[in-house]
Each structure stands twice: as C-alpha cells, then as structure tokens.
Amino acid sequence: MLTGKQKRFLRAEAHNLSPIFQVGKGGVNENMIKQISEALEVRELIKISILQNCEEDKDEVAAALSKGAKAELVQVIGHTIVLYKESRENKKIELPKVRK
C-alpha cells in the first residue's frame, strides 16, 4: 500500500505524462489488462484515459484495472486514471521512504 506522501509524489510525477491507453465502449477486458501490466513493467507509472462512450463507472474501471494488473491506484481525476506498479527489471521511480 502507498502512503499519502508517496501518492502525492506519484501524482506529481504523472502530471506531465500523456495517457497511453484508452478505455472505451468495450470497457475493461483481459487483453487490455495484459497490455497495461506489460506497460507498467516498462514504465512503472502510466495514465489511462476513459472515453466518453465508456458505459462503466470510472471508479469501477479504475478498480478493475488496478486489481487486474495488480497495480496501485494512484488517482482518478476527471476521466483519467493513474496507476503505479514497481517494476522488477526497469526500476526508475524512487518512492519517498516511509517513516515508522
């Protein structure tokens, strides 16, 4: 689980990113989740855009994607979802340390 401080850090990092996936009329499917998992392994932090014609609720889409890709849901803002998953091979993002 991410702390509030880590989520703030990731939101700032994601600010300049462009969405690389779009969820449309078809909603969330296995193929999309697989592609998102692969993109997260390479990039760690991605934005996903929910199109106007998507019939599912944006929060449900966000929950389905984060659960399916085993990623952390950083934020849902407007029709954009930000997901984070620490990469095994391509670690680029250094999260702020959690103080105990």
Image (cartoon, rainbow, N blue to C red):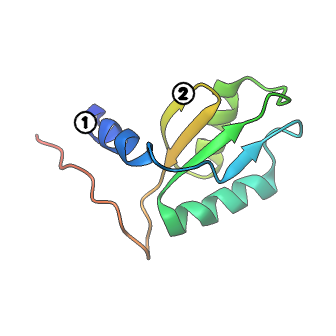
The image quadrant where one finds the N terminus is: top left
Circle 1 is placed at which residue position? 5
How far is the residue under mark 2 from the one under mark 1?
A: 18 Å
Nearest to viewer (mark 2 / mark 1): 2
Circle 2 is placed at which residue position? 77
Q: Is residue 28 left or right of residue 40?
A: right
Examine the image and state in which quarter residue 25 appears.
Answer: top right
Q: Amino acid at mark 2?
A: Ile
Residue at the spot x=29%, y=36% of the render? 3
Tell me the SS state at disc 1. Answer: helix
Location of residue 80 in the rendering, given as x and y in whole percent from the top left corner: 61, 35
Which residue is at the front of the view, 87 or 93?
93
Residue at the spot x=65%, y=54% of the render? 20
Location of residue 4 in the rendering, given as x and y in whole percent from the top left corner: 29, 32
In the rendered structure, which disc, 2 or 1, sits on the residue that comes first in sequence? Answer: 1
Q: Is residue 58 above or below residue 31?
A: above
Location of residue 65 in the rendering, given as x and y in whole percent from the top left corner: 65, 43
Tell me the SS state at disc 2. Answer: strand
Q: Is residue 100 left or right of residue 66?
A: left
Q: Are marks 2 and 1 in contact (CB under 8 Å)?
A: no
Q: Amino acid at mark 1?
A: Lys
Q: Is residue 39 left or right of residue 9?
A: right
Label 2, residues with CA under 10 Å away: few <14, some 14-19, many ≥20: few
Q: Is residue 13 above or below residue 92?
A: above
Most extreme residue toward the right is 26
Q: Is residue 67 left or right of residue 54?
A: left
Location of residue 41 in the rendering, given as x and y in whole percent from the top left corner: 53, 66
Residue at the spot x=63%, y=25% of the render? 59
Examine the image and state in which quarter residue 98 appears.
Answer: top left
Q: Is residue 36 above or below residue 13?
A: below
